[in-house]
Image (cartoon, helix red, strand yellow):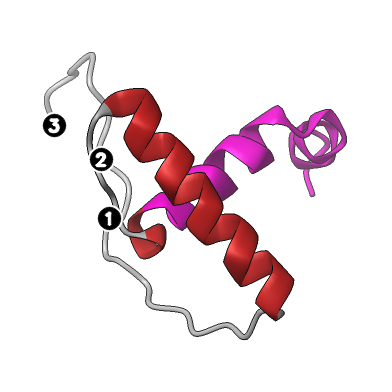
Amino acid sequence: MMDLKLGKLPDRTPVKLAITIMPDLNDALREYARCYAEAYGSEEPVTELIPAMLAAFLESDRGFARYRSNGR
């Protein structure tokens, strides 16, 4: 086996989730999408923004990072 700098890519198979949210959260997500469109000049559906929002949240959670680094 060759020794490459780039390791094997992780599994990138999308996983579809279905969730139920409260109306006030739905309103806030739609408002966020409008704000995003104004900021970047590109309209994106809420369903496209949510995965990025969740990833950013998890990356910024220091307690979760400590938990993961301690071997879960």
Q: What type is the residue that disc 3 sits on?
A: Met
Q: What type is the residue that disc 1 sits on?
A: Arg
Q: Which image quadrant for residue 22? A: bottom right
Counting from the top left corner in percent of width and height, residue 67 is at 84, 41
Residue that mark 2 sits on: 9
What type of secondary structure mainly makes up the magenta span?
A: helix
Contact? badges 1 and 2 (CB < 8 Å): yes
Does 22 appear above or below 45? below
Counting from the top left corner in percent of width and height, residue 55 is at 54, 43
Does 58 appear above or below 3? below
Counting from the top left corner in percent of width and height, residue 54 is at 57, 49
Report the span colored magenta.
49-72
Counting from the top left corner in percent of width and height, residue 47 is at 38, 64
- Residue at 53%, 45% in the rendered image: 53
Residue that mark 3 sits on: 1
Mark 1 vs mark 3, CA separation in Å: 23 Å
Q: Secondary structure at mark 1?
A: loop
Task: Compare marks 1 and 3 and give the one earlier in the sequence.
Answer: 3
Mark 3 is surrounded, within 10 Å at the Cα level, by few (under 14), some (14 to 19) or many (20 or more) other residues, namely: few
Contact? badges 3 and 2 (CB < 8 Å): no
Residue that mark 1 sits on: 12
Mark 3 vs mark 2, CA separation in Å: 16 Å
Q: Secondary structure at mark 2?
A: loop
Most extreme residue toward the top, as rendered?
Answer: 5
- Residue at 63%, 33% in the rendered image: 59
